[in-house]
Image (cartoon, coloured by chain):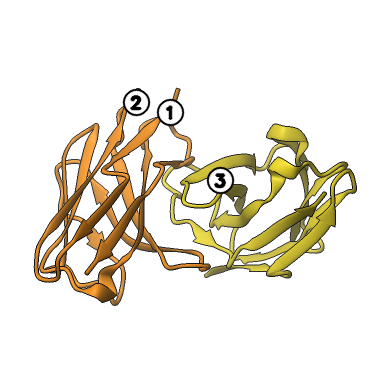
Chain colours: A orange, B yellow
């Protein structure tokens, strides 16, 4: 149990286009989902936290208008990178948590590699 | 505030020898602590977690970690390294064990190399 999937696993796009990444909890209800960004050979940096049906909470320094997060259901959150530029190229990882379980473990997706040309 | 320090950015061991990956933390509360492993271009897999129960925590693939409050440490060990253990390892802390404590703070990671 506790499987989180991401789609696509990798994407290449042209500069100026938008890219949508999906994060799904396959066998539990994810009341809270998280989006992380990981640069090569570095650790994960939290970008934003989203609760189902609410606006996402962004970490300091993360542009809300550039990284649009939607958590429309208990099993799906999407991250849209708008007007992508080469500096947005990175590994994006989502995680999901069932906040009603009284337990704070996050389950991570396999990640999405974004390359912006 | 909370923080995690992984003391080694790179550890290299021979296959069959013990593994020690060091992690120190600071937290204002009684934390939850995790070790995750990440293989190249993959997501994170939970190895083990400490949530205020037994201080010696056993995880998957033969790994274990001991929570030492007096030393604020949570070092990861394995008696005998296998080639498949070569990966990046992250020590992670949350502020406390209760529900709602989900703000993870990641260490910078330790790359483990296993020499045949």
Residue drawn at (14%, 42%) of the image: A53
Q: Contact, CB < 8 Å: mark 2 with mark 1?
A: yes
Residue B37 in the image, given as x and y percentages of width and height: 60, 48
The subunit carrying tag 3 is B
Q: How would you rate the neighbour count of disc 1 (Cα within 10 Å): few for under 14, some for 14-19, many for 20 or more?
A: some
B74 vs A96: above or below: below
Chain letter of the residue carrying label 2: A
- Seen in the picture, residue A20 relative to B8 is either above or below; the reply is above
**Taking A12 as reference, is A106 left or right?**
right
Give the residue drawn at x 34%, y 35%: A5
Question: Residue tagged by mark 3?
Answer: B97
Residue A50 percent location from the top left of the image: 25, 50
Quadrant hosting residue A95:
top left
Query: Can you tell which mark lies on residue A28?
Result: 2
Residue A85 on image: x %, y %: 19, 73
Query: Which chain is indicated by disc 1?
Result: A
The location of residue B44, given as percent across then percent down, is 51, 46
Label 2 neighbour load within 10 Å: few <14, some 14-19, many 20+: some
Labels 2 and 1: the sequence-earlier one: 1
Q: Residues within 10 Å of mark 3 (few under 14, many from 20)?
A: many
Which mark is drawn over residue A2? 1
């Amino acid at each position: 149990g506790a499987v989180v999937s991401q789609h696509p696993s990798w994407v290449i796009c042209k500069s100026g286009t938008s890219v949508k990444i999906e994060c799904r909890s396959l066998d539990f209800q994810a009341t809270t989902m998280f989006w992380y960004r990981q640069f090569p050979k570095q650790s994960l940096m939290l970008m934003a936290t989203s609760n189902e049906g609410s606006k996402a909470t962004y970490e300091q320094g993360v542009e809300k208008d550039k990284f649009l997060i939607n958590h429309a259901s208990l099993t799906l959150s999407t991250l849209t990178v708008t007007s992508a530029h080469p500096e947005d190229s990175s590994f994006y990882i989502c995680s999901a948590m069932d906040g009603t379980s009284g337990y704070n473990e996050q389950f991570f997706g396999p990640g999405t590699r974004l390359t912006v040309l | 505030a909370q923080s995690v320090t992984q003391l080694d950015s790179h550890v290299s061991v021979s296959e069959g020898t013990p593994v020690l990956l060091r992690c120190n933390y600071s937290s204002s509360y009684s934390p939850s602590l995790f070790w995750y492993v990440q293989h190249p271009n993959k997501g994170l897999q939970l190895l083990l977690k400490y949530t205020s129960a037994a201080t010696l925590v056993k995880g998957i693939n033969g790994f274990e970690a001991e929570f030492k409050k007096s030393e604020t440490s949570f070092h990861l060990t394995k008696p005998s390294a296998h080639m498949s253990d070569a990966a990046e390892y992250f020590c992670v802390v949350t502020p406390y064990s209760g529900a709602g404590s989900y703000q993870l703070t990641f260490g910078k990671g330790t790359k483990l190399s296993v020499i045949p």
